[in-house]
Amino acid sequence: MTAYPLLGSPLQLGPKTARNRIWMTAHATLLVKDHLFTEAHIAYYVARAKGGAAVITMEAMASHPTTQPYKGKAFAFDPRMVPEYAKLAEAVHEHGTLLLSQPWHRGRQTNSVTNGLPVWAPSAIPCGVYREMPHVMTGKEIAEIIEGYRLSARYSREGGLDGVEVHGMSHGYLLNQFLSPATNLRNDAYGGSLEDRMRIVMEILQACREELGPDMIMGMRLNSDDGHEGGLRPNDWADLAAEFEATGLIDYISLSHGTYINRMLIYPTAPEKHGFQLDATATVKARLKIPVVGVGRIVDPGEAEAYLTEGKLDFVGMARALVSDARWGAKALSGDAEKIRPCVGANWCMSTIFAQAPIGCIHNPSAGRELELDEDTLEPAETPRNVAVVGGGPGGMRAAWTLARRGHVVTLYEARERLGGQVRWWAKADSRTELVGIVDWLEARVRDEKVDIRLNTHATETDLAGFDAVVIATGSTGMHHGWTMLRPEKWGGDPLPGADLPHVMAYSELLETDPVVGKRVVVFDTMGGRQGAVTAEYLTQRGAQVFFVTQLGQPSPDLAASRDWGKVHGMLRRAGVTFHVDRELTEITADSVTMRDLYTGETETLGKIDSVVMVQGGSANDALFHALGDSVETHLIGDAMSARRVNDAIKEGELAARKI
């Protein structure tokens, strides 16, 4: 028996049966090499199949050479995919999971940088993200696209896959662009009336079904809401979905939201509510008889069961939740749901792709690295040792957990009264509360392994004298000397005039100690990451009027990687934050700051300032590491190595624990 009977129940999917209702939806991995899948892909998908996913839709694959946003993109129209599919299918089928390909075309939502080919679209309307004028497709080029989908279906069949999910109707991609009157201004057979706008999709469906035959699954990925003025809304998509079902060609429909006009509808960060798309999904599903896959920040099995019970969907579609924990399904259905590593909505998976790196997770170091870091195939230590971990933040806890699981005797020292480190500070901001799931999960795992935890203990050289190995995870301390990276010669000298005044503090001091800050506060952010935005948000929660100053051209530009810069900027503006970009501070007084325009040299003073919070990065707390020297085997990780990100600390904790 399971606590989630519907989630664990089988369901007919066209000519095949899915063993449960857990569906891993398509998402980019950048594990592709030479437009083909790799051994790393096999390991990635197998981990999720073994972990309980009944159906896996592989990442979107190009149906034509004109859709290549980056080099790490598989070509579904390439016959070389056939043996790649065969290897994948064999490996995934061993675990009873159905495997589908997803041919697609981005249309205007790409650029010509990678492949040197013009962007194709139904009409010459540029995308707001890429801003490149597209080439208006001719009838011959439309036929090329249809043929690309046909070949994609053929090679999927020849490669032994279970089916094909025709993509391009959702997220503002090419077929969505044909369907929507907002982006299809054609006056030929593929534009104008709804019937004509649907024509290319109908022809693609017919071509794919001809190749697949009756024994393979064929589905579609549609939007349930474009989410922008002039776009297709839930009732429009319900009409379209009913028309597509009426063809008799498809076995299911997978629904999503959004276009690149607002990508936070596609893969929103926290604090977007879980299941936010499902009301629109239910509107479309009410018109259909075939199964519907629903998505939208579904991360908890209890919530998933409730959505199934309410009839809002037939399959629970997840991507980021299964990046975070490949064994989500197995844990949920075996009674170990409390051990699921939660997706916290940080979108680090998106940030890695933005950096042209293979997929990663903010707190699952094995995601995308299953061949080397699969946590379920951990090698036991040849000789158990007595190991100390100093620092109970995420890196230290990860090291302690893995060390204990390998058979070492582990003592974890934490100077504060609670485990969790800086993550608990950042989670004080309303938009980041889910981050606490990172350290709550790690703390539970450490306690499962009965690690000797010593809180309120500043470990010294004397305390560590009897250990065989030591992991130093003592974190970092925020700096507030006041200089930007534009003044590297100043960093080792005197602070910016006034930076040593008592009302000037680093972000770490603010978040840890909650000092009185007053009503008007300057945040000076030189880093451009999420730290400045979270600091500003937290100050507004405390009732302060915040002036956000940065030497950069926009506030927190690094949020482009997680795709939520617009969402965050809007939130801060609504909270009354004012931004001052292209500025550096030149002086701080007891009640004012003076800032200089980087490009004109003009100065401006903000008066009646009660506090100044510096976001300048952190100084590594590595004194204990250097004091130990060569007296014991020592491993330095996370911010104690250099102040960076939580995923770095967790990964380095894992790597260090595997070395000892």
Image (tube, grey):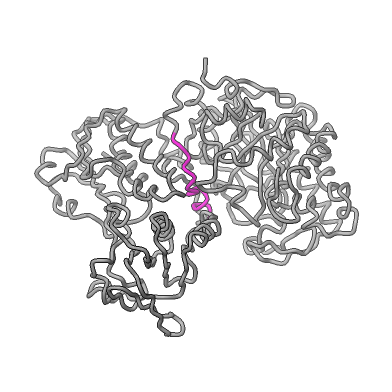
Q: Quadrant of the C terminus?
A: top left
Among all residues in the image, which is located at the extreme bottom? Answer: 601
Among all residues in the image, which is located at the extreme top? Answer: 1
Q: Nearer the viewer, residue 64 or 567?
A: 567
Give the percent coordinates (x, y) of residue 615: 35, 63
Give the extent of the magenta segment.
341-354
Q: Nearer the viewer, residue 397 or 374?
A: 397
Apparent side of residue 252 relative to residue 405 in the rendered image (left or right): right
Q: Quadrant of residue 482?
A: bottom left
Give the percent coordinates (x, y) of residue 625: 19, 51
Q: Nearer the viewer, residue 308 or 593?
A: 593
Query: Is residue 345 magenta-colored?
Result: yes
Task: Please give the count of numbered marks on the rendered protein.
Answer: 0
Query: Is residue 330 magenta-colored?
Result: no
Give the percent coordinates (x, y) of residue 183: 77, 58
Among all residues in the image, which is located at the extreme left? Answer: 462
Apparent side of residue 183 relative to residue 478 in the rendered image (left or right): right
Apparent side of residue 327 relative to residue 241 in the rendered image (left or right): left
Apparent side of residue 168 relative to residue 139 in the rendered image (left or right): left
Q: Quadrant of residue 410?
A: top left
Give the percent coordinates (x, y) of residue 312: 66, 31
| Residue at 67 percent of width and 32 percent of height | 161
